[in-house]
Image: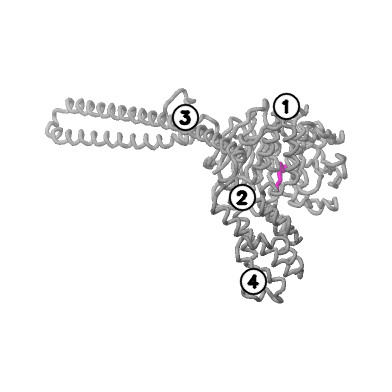
């Protein structure tokens, strides 16, 4: 029972509140000798089939079965349930005897019948032949007992016991106290669903109003076109009348020609009107993609290929992708300056986000999760890097532009260690924790970035730190005056470390030897971010010019896939800004930061087109994916951080 521990805590809390100290002591004592193992199915089965039966603890086995019979007889007077338990009890006791015979301990079988023989005879005549089994030479060949010595019967017994316990402990027969936690979670889930539905309703209402406005504009444009055509028709008719008055000498010809000319004009006017309506209808359909905002002197004329979306935002720097299909979206507005980094924790339940003003906030997006870990950390300098401990949500590492590295304990809500890099390398560009060992690596630069620019970072230093002693262990070799390192990533077992540099190089290190094992030029511009592929046969690199390459690790230097999201990046800033990318848990979708209000999500090595995120109100500066779910994180210059779940 997954809610058993929660219910026990409630009982303790109530007893303390009422002052029932003796009852509490008795309660704790009985918990210490809990024969039912907290009604955890796996522990009960292990106790029966791996402890009591192999250890020939017949008295404890009988006591456990009697405990359950008494419990179910009193708390759930269901005749079918009690009868099923009685049949299972008979089978378990016979399993004990069969194990004793198989193990050559016939004395244990005789001992068992000596202790429990009278009770067994009172339960029915089925036990009578079993009293002779210790004295039969080969009972496994006897038709009476042969089936009980088979592997199939033993496995069927285990499965029957598991199904029975699951039905009892996880079914509808559990006490009301154990349902409190589940009901609380259900209420939280329903509240969350209601909130999501309200958001969708608001979006649909806004979309409906927008469509109504577009239809009204379209009708107005069509009406104005009809009026213009009508005036043109009247002018043509008047001109024809004047022409008739001044050419009386051609009256016979005019009588023949003038009606034909008038009819052609009318047909022409009608054709022009129909053409105008058709054009207006085309423009109306185009409104859903290019809605004008009255920038051209208040004119109502629709401008094709307008650089503004339906909300009036500039889209000239966005990919021509459809919007991502969203299940729900939460927005965190706790920061007061542009976001520099944001990361999911190892479990994905917590989020750390940092901003230019030197603050880091830890928060949760799930309303069903306790917000007790929420905290604000003041670092006193711009945050350059964040990384969570890989095995838990307990520690968060923070790197700043002033050479500081802080280790924040989320449970204790305090800084447990405050480290400093050397004065020669003050900017902590990236931090990565090993997925296996209690170590992390920091990439520091001798220069200080200005507003995210990475063209003057100077030289690099890679330091390995011990997370138990909080001391530097070694400095990885990079050669003489190496260009600054901008991004780090470990492979799954922490044996290999990849590092990207401002000169466009990718470096690979063997962490056990502490040496660089390979490297190759990957970009013509500084590299902003690198990530191992999901199967670790490839590695992705993102240049500051926006170009993305997937490199083969088996055939070094071979490009497996590439993309150039030029419309999401400002070419004038190429080679200067720190961009980020993030790979989803399945390794199929790549999310990239953007200079526009939306960020592109690419399908890796797929013919399917990508999608775009829902818009922020400013450029997207940081991204991350949930470690297991289709949920991504975006931080923006508009001071907001959003969590988006995709369908």
Residue 205 picture location, percent across and down: 45, 31
Mark 2 or mark 4: which comes first in sequence? 4
Residue 356 picture location, percent across and down: 71, 29
Mark 2 or mark 3: which comes first in sequence? 3
Contact between labelled residues 1 and 2, with CB atoms less than 8 Å apart: no
- Which label was assigned to residue 588? 2
- Which label was assigned to residue 13? none
Instruction: Say how many tags the image has.
Output: 4
Say which of 445 and 166 sits in front.
166
The residue that disc 3 covers is 292
Query: Rounded to the nearest whole Å, what is the CA distance between mark 2 and mark 4?
Result: 57 Å
- Judge depth for marks 3 and 4 and give the one in front: 4
Query: Rounded to the nearest whole Å, what is the CA distance between mark 2 and mark 3?
Result: 36 Å
The residue that disc 1 covers is 357
Drawn side of residue 289 relative to residue 90, left or right: left
Say which of 38 and 518 sits in front.
38
Residue 10 picture location, percent across and down: 67, 35
Drawn side of residue 76 relative to residue 58, left or right: left
* Quarter of the view holding residue 614: top right
Drawn side of residue 206 relative to residue 506, left or right: left
Tag 1, which secondary structure?
A: loop
The region drawn magenta spans 525-531
Q: Residue at x 85, y 42 (%)?
A: 468
Q: Residue at x 27, y 28 (%)?
A: 230
Contact between labelled residues 4 and 3, with CB atoms less than 8 Å apart: no
Mark 4 or mark 1: which comes first in sequence? 4
Query: Rounded to the nearest whole Å, what is the CA distance between mark 4 and mark 1?
Result: 79 Å
In which quadrant is the C terminus drawn?
top right
């Amino acid at each position: 029972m997954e809610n058993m521990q929660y219910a026990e805590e409630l009982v303790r809390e109530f007893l303390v509140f009422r002052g029932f100290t003796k009852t509490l002591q008795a309660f704790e004592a009985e918990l210490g000798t809990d024969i039912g193992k907290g009604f955890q199915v796996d522990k009960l089965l292990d106790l029966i089939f791996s402890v009591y039966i192999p250890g020939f603890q017949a008295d404890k086995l009988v006591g456990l079965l009697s405990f359950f019979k008494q419990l179910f007889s009193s708390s759930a007077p269901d005749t079918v349930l009690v009868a099923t338990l009685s049949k299972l009890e008979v089978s378990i006791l016979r399993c004990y005897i069969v194990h004793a015979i198989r193990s050559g301990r016939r004395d244990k079988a005789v001992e068992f019948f000596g202790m429990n023989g009278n009770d067994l005879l009172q339960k029915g005549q089925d036990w009578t032949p079993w009293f002779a089994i210790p004295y039969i030479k080969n009972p496994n060949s006897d038709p009476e007992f042969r089936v009980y010595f088979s592997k199939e019967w033993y496995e069927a017994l285990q499965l029957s016991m598991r199904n029975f316990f699951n039905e009892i402990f996880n079914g509808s027969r559990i006490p009301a106290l154990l349902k409190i936690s589940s009901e609380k979670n259900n209420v939280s889930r329903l509240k969350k669903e209601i909130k999501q539905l309200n958001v969708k309703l608001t979006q649909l209402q806004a979309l409906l109003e927008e469509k109504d406005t577009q239809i009204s504009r379209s009708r107005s444009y069509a009406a104005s076109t009809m009026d213009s055509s009508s005036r043109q028709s009247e002018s043509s008719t008047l001109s024809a009348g004047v022409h008739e008055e001044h050419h009386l000498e051609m009256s016979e010809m005019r009588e023949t020609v003038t009606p034909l000319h008038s009819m052609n004009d009318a047909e022409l006017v009608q054709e022009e009107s129909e053409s105008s309506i058709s054009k207006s209808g085309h423009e109306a359909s185009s409104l859903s993609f290019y809605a004008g905002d009255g920038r051209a002197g208040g004119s109502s004329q629709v401008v094709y290929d307008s650089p503004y979306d339906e909300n009036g935002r500039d889209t000239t720097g966005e990919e021509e992708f459809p919007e991502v299909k969203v299940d729900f979206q939460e927005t965190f507005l706790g920061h007061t300056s542009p976001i520099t980094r944001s990361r999911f924790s190892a479990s994905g339940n917590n989020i750390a986000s940092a901003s230019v003003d030197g603050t880091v906030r830890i928060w949760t997006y799930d309303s069903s999760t306790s917000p007790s870990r929420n905290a604000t950390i003041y670092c006193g300098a711009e945050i350059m890097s964040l990384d969570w401990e890989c095995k838990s949500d307990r520690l968060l590492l923070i790197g700043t532009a002033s050479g500081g590295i802080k280790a924040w304990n989320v449970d204790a809500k305090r800084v447990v260690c405050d480290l400093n890099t050397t004065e020669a390398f003050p900017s902590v560009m990236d931090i990565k924790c090993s997925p296996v060992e209690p170590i992390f690596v920091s990439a520091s630069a001798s220069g200080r970035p200005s507003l995210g620019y990475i063209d003057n970072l100077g030289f690099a230093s890679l330091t390995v730190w011990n997370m138990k002693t909080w001391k530097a262990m070694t400095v990885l070799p990079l050669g003489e005056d190496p260009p600054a390192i901008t991004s780090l990533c470990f492979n799954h077992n922490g044996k290999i470390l990849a590092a990207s540099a401002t000169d466009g190089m990718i470096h690979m290190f063997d962490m056990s030897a502490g040496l660089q094992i390979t490297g190759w030029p990957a970009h013509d511009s500084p590299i902003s971010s690198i990530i191992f592929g999901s199967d670790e046969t490839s590695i992705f690199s993102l240049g500051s010019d926006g170009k993305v390459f997937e490199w083969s690790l088996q055939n070094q230097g071979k490009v497996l896939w590439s993309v150039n999201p030029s419309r999401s990046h400002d070419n004038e800033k190429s080679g200067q800004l720190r961009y980020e990318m993030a790979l989803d848990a399945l390794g199929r979708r790549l999310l990239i930061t953007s200079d526009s209000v939306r960020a592109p999500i690419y399908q890796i090595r797929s013919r399917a087109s990508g999608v775009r995120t829902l818009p922020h109100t400013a450029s997207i500066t940081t991204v991350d994916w949930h470690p297991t779910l289709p949920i991504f994180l975006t931080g923006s210059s508009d001071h907001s951080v959003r969590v988006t779940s995709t369908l």
